[in-house]
Amino acid sequence: MGIFARLFEKVASLRGEPSQAELDEIRESLIAADLGPTLAGEIIDLVRRERNDLALAVKSELMKCFLSDSRELIRRDPLTTIMVVGVNGTGKTTSVAKIAERFHRSGEKVLVTAADTFRAAAIEQLSTWADRIGVAVHSSSSGSDPASVAFDGAKRAASESFTIHIIDTAGRLHTMSNLMSELGKVKRVAEKVSPVNEVLLVLDGTVGQNAIVQAREFMAAIPITGLVLTKMDGSAKGGAVLAIERELSIPIKLIGTGEKASDLENFEPSLFLDRLLAS
């Protein structure tokens, strides 16, 4: 049973006005589901005010967590360049492949560039994905300068009339400032050839509030235009999604729901909330 289903069940079982102890218990369960203390407090206020139509009131309140910004991936003619960043283990390279597959399926000519030259298997992993989904891949040897690889990929994308160029960058801990600053260099060098239109940050939807900490460090290193949440196949608590967009003011554009190339969905706040409240 999901956190909100338990909330509604708990409230329905209350007799009369909830006691402070009961409200504290509800608050703790909401915080444990990664809503964060501020949003948990707002839900508690709803419990006090809206006992009869609580589910409707909760959805209305939670919708305020989401931006009105467009969630479409930015497209520019004749070439769209997308840079994908994130911490190791978030599913970054797999997300690159899923995005490439989506564009390829819609008829675009797609090039993926393996600028993650630090992780031993990253180039091979992306090349395997590219072969599987039928898109071109640009790569160099392991240990090559990532900015140089991105630059060469950008030149190839422009000269060979690709319409989509996706740059996979090295996964890095958000606490390693030297590696974080390198992201800016990769972007600057690629933009000597063609503008980077979209910078997507991949976040693990299961890590809760820590995802917000990660995101703030990436935002300090490079302008982020959209978020991709991975591992949203039912294992995520869900509350983190609400807190992430509200705290960061960056739109969630895509969610990964599985391991297959097709397991990528547009993020739709209302549908997400319907699932979350019904779970």
Image (cartoon, rainbow, N blue to C red):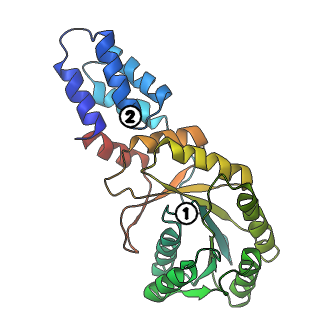
What is the x, y in percent for residue 188?
Answer: 80, 67
Vertical comparison of 175 with 112: above or below: above
Q: Identify residue for label 2.
A: 32
Amino acid type of the residue tagged 2 in the rendering: Ala
Q: Are marks 2 and 1 in contact (CB under 8 Å)?
A: no
What is the x, y in percent for residue 204?
Answer: 47, 55
What is the x, y in percent for residue 213?
Answer: 59, 44
Quarter of the picture containing the C terminus is: top left
Q: Earlier in the sequence, mark 2 or mark 1?
A: 2
Q: Looking at this rendering, what residue extends furthest in the right direction?
A: 192
With 275 as the anchor, is 212 left or right in this view? right
With 149 as the anchor, is 28 left or right in this view? left
What kind of element bears circle 2? Answer: helix
Alpha carbon distance from label 2 to label 1? 25 Å
Quarter of the picture containing the N terminus is: top left
Disc 1 residue crowd, few under 14, some 14–19, many 20+, Cα 10 Å: some
Front residue of 39/216: it is: 216
Residue 252 visible, this orientation: yes
Amino acid type of the residue tagged 1 in the rendering: Asn
Front residue of 245/90: it is: 90
Residue sitting at x 64%, y 68%: 83
Residue sitting at x 47%, y 32%: 36
Vertical comparison of 140 with 43: above or below: below
Residue sitting at x 80%, y 72%: 189
Vertical comparison of 133 with 196: above or below: below
Question: What label does residue 88 carry, if any?
Answer: 1
Residue sitting at x 65%, y 77%: 117
With 17 as the anchor, is 150 left or right in this view? right
